């Protein structure tokens, strides 16, 4: 039975889509079957996998309003073992349409359960809001990964998100847990960055991923080529950091032995 993980933070630009794309690509390269459900109308994880929005016939919008099933909307990407349910702009309308629908917070869950056995990991890339779509994702998920920047104001946002998680837990999904808080665009040389990590570790002991994703230009270039960073520049710090995060998620040692690294990164695009 696949693990369902929402990647959520109501702040935009904290690395949610980047984390979905790159973590999925790495796990796929390790033989895990992965589905990414792009739930942000901006569609950044859709385009990050090189899928042209114009070519999309069925999307997360159709899935949420019940027009299509996930199995009909999922597209195989060019990258090993990774499929995507794409998002297009029409998803913005779902936020409002859902309010008047039956089971408005359970719609994602009902759909995801139908494909749970077909994948090892299902990631849901959330929009930058705590609205109905994000609630749908949290209701559908086993756990949540929270990417965040190591900035002072990030702490306030975190407590808001944690409140929402509590509400979802007590009303809809008691098993929901925080898988981990992931610091992205991290600069270990900055005192404020280390202070924020220490503060978050204090409030969420054991919940901060040991892996920190550094700010890395290759990570930000890769989406414009429609590729995860490990396919764009396999030896970049960005690719390595998402590989380490993959190790951490799989419960493996946090090291990158040279020989093994060559093995892992010998994968090529499928087509
Ligand atoms: N580790 C990183 N280093 C450099 N740029 C990054 C990194 N992570 C994300 N970015 C860039 O920051 C921007 C926001 O990231 P994104 O994943 O789209 O955030 P979100 O999905 O939370 O809105 C994008 O342009 C992305 O390419
Ligand atoms: Mg995003």
Image (cartoon, grey):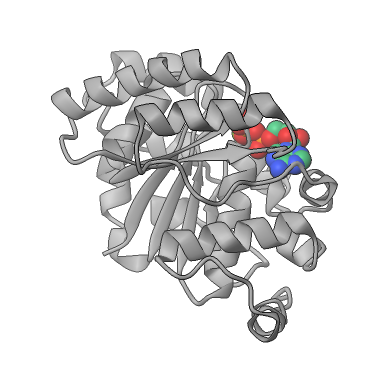
Q: Is residue 11 left or right of residue 72?
A: right
User: For the image shown, how many numbered marks are present on the structure?
Assistant: 0
Which one is in front, 45 or 215? 215
Residue 98 placement (x, y as % from top left): 36, 20
Residue at left offset 50%, top offset 31%: 198
Residue 68 visible in the current orientation: no
Q: Is residue 137 visible?
A: yes
Picture coordinates of residue 60, whole percent (x, y): 48, 39
Counting from the top left corner in percent of width and height, residue 128 is at 55, 23
Left/right placement of residue 26 relative to residue 130 reads: right
- The answer to whether 108 is drawn above or below residue 12 in the figure is below
Is 235 in front, or is 80? 235
Height in image: 126 above or below 221?
above
Based on the displayed image, in which of its 4 quarters is residue 160 positioned?
Answer: top left
Above/below status of 136 relative to 184: above
**Residue displayed at 77% across by 53% down:** 226
If the image is split into quadrants, where does the N terminus sit?
bottom left
Viewer-nearest residue: 106 or 243? 243
Residue 106 left/right relative to 90: left
**What percent of the width, then of the height, locates residue 184?**
63, 39
Residue at x-position 63% and y-position 55%: 22
| Quadrant placement of the C terminus | bottom right
Give 197 or 44, whichever is nearer the viewer: 197
Q: Residue at x 82, y 51 (%)?
A: 218
């Amino acid at each position: 039975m696949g693990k369902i993980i929402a990647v959520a933070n109501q702040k935009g630009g904290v690395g949610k889509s980047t984390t979905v794309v790159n973590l999925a690509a790495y796990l796929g390269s390790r033989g895990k079957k992965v589905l990414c459900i792009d739930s942000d109308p901006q569609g950044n994880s859709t385009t990050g996998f090189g899928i042209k929005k114009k070519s999309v016939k069925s999307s997360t919008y159709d899935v949420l309003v019940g027009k299509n099933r996930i199995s009909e909307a999922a597209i195989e990407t060019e990258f090993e073992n990774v499929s995507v349910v794409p998002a297009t702009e029409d998803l913005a309308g779902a936020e409002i349409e859902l309010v008047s629908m039956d089971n408005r917070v359970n719609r994602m869950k009902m759909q995801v359960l139908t494909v749970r056995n077909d994948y090892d990991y299902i990631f849901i890339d959330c929009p930058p809001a705590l609205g109905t779509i994000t609630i749908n994702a949290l209701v559908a998920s086993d756990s949540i990964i929270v990417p965040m920047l190591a900035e002072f104001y990030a702490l306030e946002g975190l407590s808001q998100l944690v409140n929402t998680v509590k509400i979802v837990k007590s009303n809809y999904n008691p098993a929901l847990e925080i898988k981990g808080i992931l610091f992205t665009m991290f600069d270990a040389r900055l005192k404020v960055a280390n202070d924020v990590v220490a503060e978050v570790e204090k409030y969420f002991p054991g919940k901060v991923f040991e892996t920190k994703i550094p700010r890395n230009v290759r990570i930000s270039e890769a989406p414009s080529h429609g590729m995860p960073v490990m396919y764009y520049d396999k030896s970049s710090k960005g690719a390595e950091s998402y590989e380490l995060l993959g190790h951490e998620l799989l419960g493996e040692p946090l090291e990158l032995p040279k020989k093994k690294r060559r093995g892992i990164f010998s994968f090529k695009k499928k087509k």
